[in-house]
Amino acid sequence: MTKALPANLEQIEVNLKKLTNQRTRSSLLGIAILILIFFGGTLVSLEANAGSFGRGIANFFNYPRDLFVDTFEMGWKYWPRVIKYIPELIITLNIALFSTSIGFVLAVIFAIFSSRNLIRNKRVIQFTKFFMDVTRSFPTLIIAMVFLYLMGKSSLPAVIAITIHTAGALGKLFTEAIENCDGKPIEGLSSVGATWTQKIRFSVLPQVLPLFLSYGILRLEINVRESTILGFVGAGGIGEMLAALIQWNYGADVLACMFLLVGTIIALDYLSAYWRHKLIGANQ
Amino acid sequence: MSSSLAIQRENIRKLFPDTFNQARKSRLRGQIIFFLVLVYLIVGFFTLDVVDIPKKWKPQNAAMFVLDTYAHKDHVTMKWENHEDIKIAFEGNYRSVYGRDNLDKSIPDWFYKNSDNVGNVVEFNNKGKAILYKDKVEIVNFPKYERDFTIKLNSNGKPYLVGSEDLVIEDLKGFRITENRVEFRPTLYERIQVYPKKVEIHRYSIGWKYFWFDFSSPLEPYTFFEALGLTFSKERVVPEMSNLKLFLTEIKDNEAFMHGRVWWAMLETIVMAVLGTMFATVMALPLSFLAAYNVTPIKALRFTLRRLFDTLRGIDFLIWSLIFLRAFGPGPFTGIFAIGFTDTGTLGKLYSEAIENTEKKQQEGVKSTGASKFLQHRFGIIPQILPIFVSQSLYYLESNTRGAVIIGAMGAGGIGLQFLGALGTGNDFENVAYMAILVLAVVIFMDRLSAWLRRILIGSDQLIVR
């Protein structure tokens, strides 16, 4: 026993050395790959970019400065302008809120049909999961542009695109939430002979609803940004207004829209953090 | 029995009055919220004109769009003034005309002389035929049509369907007759239009023709694998260059699908996403340490950095890309910096929260050995948060790929702009579909890649939050 110990120690020493070497090697390899990606990417960018990098850095502050100068020249007349764009902002918010609500409902349905602990049929699960993967992976912009082409200019393409994307993105998170929820309440309800819908209503939903709402609020925040961007390609709201103002070079108005947007996003950010904390904190 | 149950229930109710009242109260609250949501949905339904969807949705347009994404068509055009001069062109493109002298491109076998040796036959995929004569067009042999049709020009030079007054409505299905045009379209795949000046026939077939090699390419007669096999043979297809070089340049310079341009654009988009994420990670790493209370004792610095993160995140990447677009012009730098700035805010916030949530004990252990502050952080904090950092950054890589497509479409170039361009031309829908599939594939690939990297680097592909 006492004789075996030094041999073991030696073995440990050797193993440790081997592991350390391996670790160093893979770290170096990782760093080398990162550096390669960095330089390769920079080369591609230098090749593809219209303007040069150096001039770009030098010009960085020009545009914001122009905007602010334009704004200061207007003085007190500026504030009515800001208020003028609030209705546009409300359109954008409306698109986001409406499509998040519809997408939320669809996501709950998808999630129920793709959760292993609720559905026995593997085919159904695989199909729903694949479907969600596809809807989630398309950038909203691509869906929206296709529908804009087919339906003409209106807010509807944005609503459709965001709803589709939200259903996929939330559906995946919801599925994880349902699959990770406690199985005992479901068993309990099964033991008293509850039907499938009753089990979902009284054992699964109470467990996951706070989490669902929290994810939904986070998604709402993302969707406000999305609906602004979709406005840029013609879906209406403050995005479309901003695109037009930039084209006309109305510096002060551009800045007004930007302020409204940034203010809204920051406000939503805080609100959603507060709500989510309240929802999940209260439940734990 | 039932009465005893009812009594028991009453007893339980009496024993725990608070629980039951609370349940009722929370149920009432739930109902109110449900009602409010319902009211909002109804309001939204009308303010966003969702009711207009059936009115705006034109199934004809959508069907044409979808048809064009998976099928191609050949145009056959005959001018009445010279009925022997018939032009057959792929997608009606004047550069892709069959049987022209300078191109060694024979007439397709679905176009031939009729058995009477006078008319020229265009045979469709469903065996229906349009026979072109000097003074008339005969439509014969269409399945589901019991009779044949003849279209002629009248004395005023306008087209008309011969004997149309004797036909009943059912026989005329597929016809659209206006003053200057007679159109016959039994299904989406066959279309015959007769005008006062010319006859135009569209013959649709399924598939992406000329996907690898375009119409005028010397490799066009071969399939993809045949051409690949040719690259190993010494005999040159064209004398100027080797087969391998020809093979690659012909694919790259394909006029129909523009592989070279599309793939370069895709690469630009990927570069934007990857370098943008790297930029954000490198920026957020030191800043997050300075913004964490267990590393930085100066409250003012922490507060400033926190607000900086909020601002960077709050100015959405849309606005960042507008600003950078002015500075750098269209190109990947715009995307890299727009993504990088936004995500510096996001990652900085997440990282600093992760640092604040670390266990104190490791740090204390290192401290007990008399290590300096720097070493305490190096061995007490970094090993704990490294998996979280990697996990978060990789997670954002996938969503940034989607973001890069969007920034591209706003003017920064890349696949987004190509997509917008293809959609704008209004007839290259096979390109639209091709790019959409490419984007989908790349986004899914990035998703899988980041999950795989997470698995080999940290042993779990789930997003670690704390």
Image (cartoon, rainbow, N blue to C red):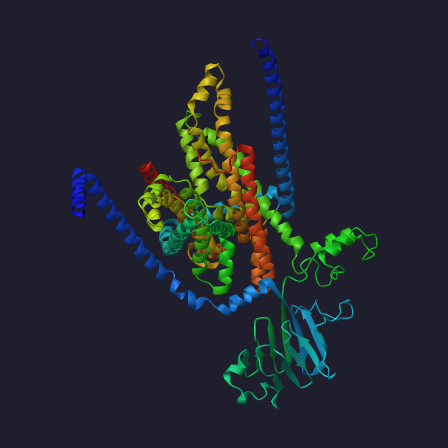
Residue at 35%, 47% in the rendered image: A200
Q: Nearer the viewer, residue B187 or B237?
A: B187
- Camera sees residue A121: yes
Q: Nearer the viewer, residue A219 or A248?
A: A219
In the rendered image, the residue lying farthest to the front is B1
Q: Quick one: quadrant of the C terminus of chain B? A: top left
On the rendered structure, is B228 left or right of B74?
right
Q: Quadrant of residue B198?
A: bottom right
Residue at 74%, 53% in the rendered image: B228
Residue at 55%, 64% in the rendered image: B66
Tell me where residue A82 appears, x and y as whole percent. Answer: 38, 52
Tell me where residue A154 appears, x and y as whole percent. Answer: 44, 62
In the rendered image, the residue lying farthest to the top is A2
Rendered position, A114 above or below B194: above
Q: Quadrant of residue A188?
A: top left
Q: How many marks do you count on the picture?
A: 0
Tell me where residue A127 appears, x and y as whole percent. Answer: 49, 52
Tell me where residue A169 appears, x and y as whole percent. Answer: 46, 48
- Camera sees residue A250: no
Q: Nearer the viewer, residue A65 or B240?
A: B240
In the rendered image, the residue lying farthest to the bottom is B155
Rendered position, B384 above or below B364: below
